[in-house]
Image (spheres, rainbow, N blue to C red):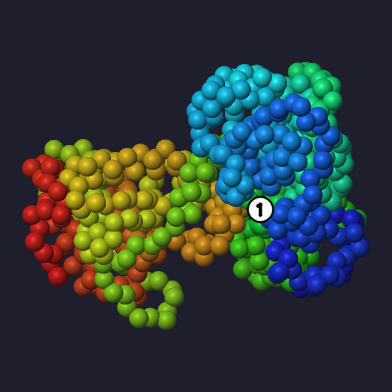
Amino acid sequence: MQFKAIKPMNFTYSQTNPSLNNNKGDNMPGEFTSSTQEKKNSTDNILTNNTLEVEKCKIVNHSTGETRSCVVIGGTTLAIRCTQQLQAAGYIIVAIFPTESLFSEWATSQNIHCVEALEDLLTLSKTQSICWLFSIVNPVILPALLINQFSRGAFNYHDAPLPRYAGTHATSWAILAGESRYAITWHLIGSMVDSGDIIVQRHVDIKNTDTALSLNLKCYQAAAEGFTELLNNLENGDIPRRQQDPDNRSFFSRRRRPDAAGCLLWNKKAQELSSLVRSLTFGVYYPNPLTLPKVLLRDRLVSIGTLQVMYTRSDHKPGTLLGISEDHWLMTTSSEDIRISFVNSRGNPINALTLANQCKLEIGDQLPTIERSDIKTLTDIHEQLTEQELFWQKRLERFSTPMLPFKLRATIDKIPDWHVSEWKTVLNHSSLISTELVQHIICAWFIYLAHTSNDTQFQVGWAQAGDVVHSSKWTSFFAMIVPMEVHINLQQRLTEILNSISSEQQLLEQHRVYPRDMVTRQPVLRAINLLHTNRPWPIGISIISGYSEDLTNKDAMQEYAIVGEIMTLQIDQNKGNFRFIYNSKLVAVNDIEHVASDLALFSNVIANSKNLNIVANELPIYEFSR
């Protein structure tokens, strides 16, 4: 259904990939598209490697009689640019401690010594007199013992005005707070994070069209200019110092996240929702460290592509759907109406009319709201899980799928038909507690896969109920299936393999799950197609406690977690049983029966304590049932 266009105000914010943007330059008056601005700003602010090679650093006047040595810690192209300025100004770069690969690769190409750990840098600074330390886009907290080794001082770059925006992701928090004046800061490193005396501060204006991306680029340019000022101050021997007022200090921790995992809350004002979307717009080429702006639509979440504040203000309740077209919806808030468009997990535009039809939404419907108590719970869970994101990101970057122990059926029917095998019992488990029994069955399964595939490294899907995150209320927000990684060396003793599986289970329990939108927020993960599916791994493992005897009930079967896209090993930790859930359109019943029988045989051998010190390749199993 179409609706009459309403004249917009000057607030439109987009996360759409420029190569997929359908505007074709026909932006409405005052419209801002972050992806378009991204291309322009990335050129203006010298972010590309090619530009770095020809960028002329400003020369700082200096006397040639004084030896000035320094160490640089940090990363990104800003660290490279500042190091180039140091070289041009005659500083001796004793060493670099790179916190990411780009800076490391550049330093290596320049034959600059790199240290790999803070301990190495501390040792170096104790054995060699070094004047200055420069910390530039550095996520590592530096110990006082290291800071005190530098005879002339240690400086840090912070991309925000201190003391009001100490901590991380400051540009996003400033946009979210509706700030119009901002700044970057070069300061001495103090006893607390971002607490030292201010040396240089460069002001930056925030426009009502700025996103996290565009503000970061403004800060990049201001930081480079501020660094030139800092070097001039060092050269003149006149370093202006201004103490920070602790009463004005605000600190934003690394784990802090926007309320409700970035969901639009319809009782907010339109400008607040606009600020939320802009604060979470980092562009398609850069990681988004926080979350995606999104809308809750009954049983699913959809990411926001653009949000535009309108001149109109309707009388309907906040969250009411006023209009639907192919490229956007018109929605009410507690103030002005807004126009929103959507993108999928790959960042591609979603047809808004099709989306409304899929969700059975019509004009006049009111979108779901998140209760106040749920907002706090959701925000708390989200912030708890942020500490685990780096672990999952690195693991997902190693994404792989194991070889199946049988050939798949040929079919063009993509709708799965889930079946279950008979429960198999591990007989030799009377002396094992439930956790040990689960480990023995998992161990048998991976050794079996290693025998049948000749592989040694496996990544499969894993799901274990019991965590509050697995509540049906939060399944749209967090990945219920995570990657389990196991390395099988058939030359190891059985007890060693069991220990490694136990360690892996502890890791999985410790790191829990990750936000679903993390795949979209990290460009390297976004490029892995299977990570955009509900079940990325063909083989999965599901741990349950008790089960229903009604094997014909497909809903009950779903309740116990279909984890693998093709097959799931389901283990009941209470009874010592296991079975397979499988897609019968791809897997023959005979194949599953053979695998289940083999695994039962293998599990009983492994559960026998007499075999624990036997090398896996020499277990008393001469051939499988096939």
Seen at 24% across and 59% down, the residue is 450
Q: Quadrant of residue 10?
A: bottom right
Looking at the picture, how far across and down is residue 399, in whole percent? 44, 57
**Front one among 206 and 94:** 94
| Quadrant in the picture for residue 252 | top right
Residue 19 coordinates in the image, percent (x, y) = 71, 69
Give the structural element (helix, strand or loop) at label 1: loop
The location of residue 412, given as percent across then percent down, is 42, 81
Q: Residue at x 37, y 50 (%)?
A: 484
Camera-nearest residue between 283 and 73: 73
How many numbered discs, if any? 1
Q: Is 592 on the left or on the right of 44, as rendered?
A: left
Image quadrant assignment for residue 423: bottom left
Task: Out of 561 and 198, give the one closest to the viewer.
Answer: 198
Any part of residue 128 in sight: yes
Q: Residues within 10 Å of mark 1 (few under 14, many from 20)?
A: few
Three-letter code, disc 1: Tyr
Task: Classify 35 as above or below 336.
Answer: below
Q: Is residue 597 above or below residue 609?
A: below
The image shows residue 50 at horizontal and vertical percentages of 70, 58
Q: Assign the C terminus to one quadrant of the image.
A: bottom left
Answer above or below: position of 567 versus 88: below
Question: Residue under circle 1?
Answer: 286
Q: Is residue 163 above or below residue 222?
A: above
